[in-house]
Amino acid sequence: MSGSLLVLNSGSSSLKFSLFEYAADEWPPLLAHGEVAGIDERPELLLRDADGVTIVPDPPVLFDHGGHEHVLDLLDELFARLFQAHPLVAVGHRVVHGGAGRSEACRVDRPILDALAQLIPLAPLHQGHNLAPIDAWLRRAPLMPQVAAFDTAFHQTIAPWRQRYPLPADLTGPDIRRYGFHGLSYQYLSMRLRAQDPAAGGRCVALHLGAGASMCALDHGISVSTSMGFTALDGLPMATRCGSLDPGLLLHLLDNGALAPQALRERLYHDSGLLALSGGISGDMRRLLDSPRPEAADAVRHFCWRARRELGAMAAELGGLDSIVFTAGIGEHAAPVRAEILRGLEFLGIELDAHANAAHADCISSPASAVRVLVMATNEEAMIARQMQALLA
């Protein structure tokens, strides 16, 4: 009999979950995965086995009201048979912000949970939702080991002088610094890339492009620079988040009374980015690519320009490139976006294979390209399970 590891990735109204076998393998084998949507209203379930085959609960489990406690009941019901053969060993959680000094996953108890809750203002779209199932498990099964894996941890390798902001010392402290996010995704990509092709895993720029978007410069698997900073608002424009702005613009909006601080926060997180650039058409890249309106084309063009500019800067930081990796929803599925980001970068030794790109091949660079350009699916849940297994061992 072997054990199992339950990995939870909680959002505002949904909870993604994966069940892995607790094994001696470097990467714990997947047993099942799925998602519960509509947590705050009426949960709806999608569950697949390790081969991607949809599993229908027997009998179906429905609730008339939501909340994480009820979702945990649902998971208990779904995995009852699996838990008989693979008793639950621990529960792992993706937590976006770990704060300064957390460079690896850790066991979570009530004091650590309270400390992580203090970081909610730095990641308001994610942190509170990430912590909700931890709190539910602590109340439900206080002796069950829980592990938090942090998106910020992977970027602790960035040089301290690069993490600093050019602000007076009395305005800053050890907690005011560049953190970077999407670290679990970048760590997974860097490990997979180096295992598959050590040469390509040298100087690499990874682009995690989804509703949240960022980029990371990797030197032999180590994060040396990333586009996001103190919060997940920084860097590239995203679905509804603004990306980098002139701070003087924000001062102007506040000084003129156009917006109060809390209202400004809401607008920057929820009303900006691609949604704003397209004039309100959508923050979804798929809809923008399908739209015939010029505002949609301009939003896509702006997004690709910012990514291209960031890619050039990171190539300079690394002293050249061995590989580029696209991942996440846009990075894996939007061939026109990949092509537009790479357009004009032939001077870096990049030569795109248009047919391979259109087919979403694993490698989309031509055989003559000095830089390998790859498309890789990320797997943050597998990365969390790996970190859990190492910590529990």
Image (spheres, grey):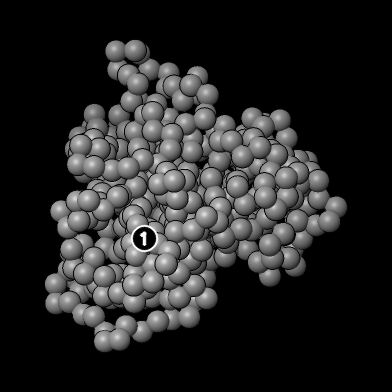
Relative vertical location of residue 393 with respect to residue 366 in this rendering, above or below = above
Q: Residue furthest bottom?
A: 59
Which of the 4 quarters of the picture holds residue 137? bottom left
Q: Is residue 187 left or right of residue 41?
A: right
Considering the image in quadrants, where does the N terminus appear? bottom left
At 66% across and 37% down in the image, what residue appears?
Answer: 220
At 29% across and 46% down in the image, what residue appears?
Answer: 127
- Which residue is tagged 1? 6
Q: Is residue 288 left or right of residue 120?
A: right
Horizontal and vertical percent position of residue 242: 39, 45
Q: Residue furthest top?
A: 169
**Element under label 1?**
strand
Horizontal and vertical percent position of residue 182: 46, 46
Front-most of residues 67 and 294:
67
Relative vertical location of residue 126 with respect to residue 67 in this rendering, above or below = above
Q: Residue furthest right?
A: 368
Query: Label 1: few (<14), some or many (≥20) within 10 Å?
Result: many
At 36% across and 60% down in the image, what residue appears?
Answer: 6
Relative vertical location of residue 276 with respect to residue 88 in this rendering, above or below = above
Let me know if residue 242 appears in the view. Answer: no
Q: Is residue 161 left or right of residue 262?
A: right
Front-most of residues 318 and 142:
142
Number of numbered labels in the structure image: 1
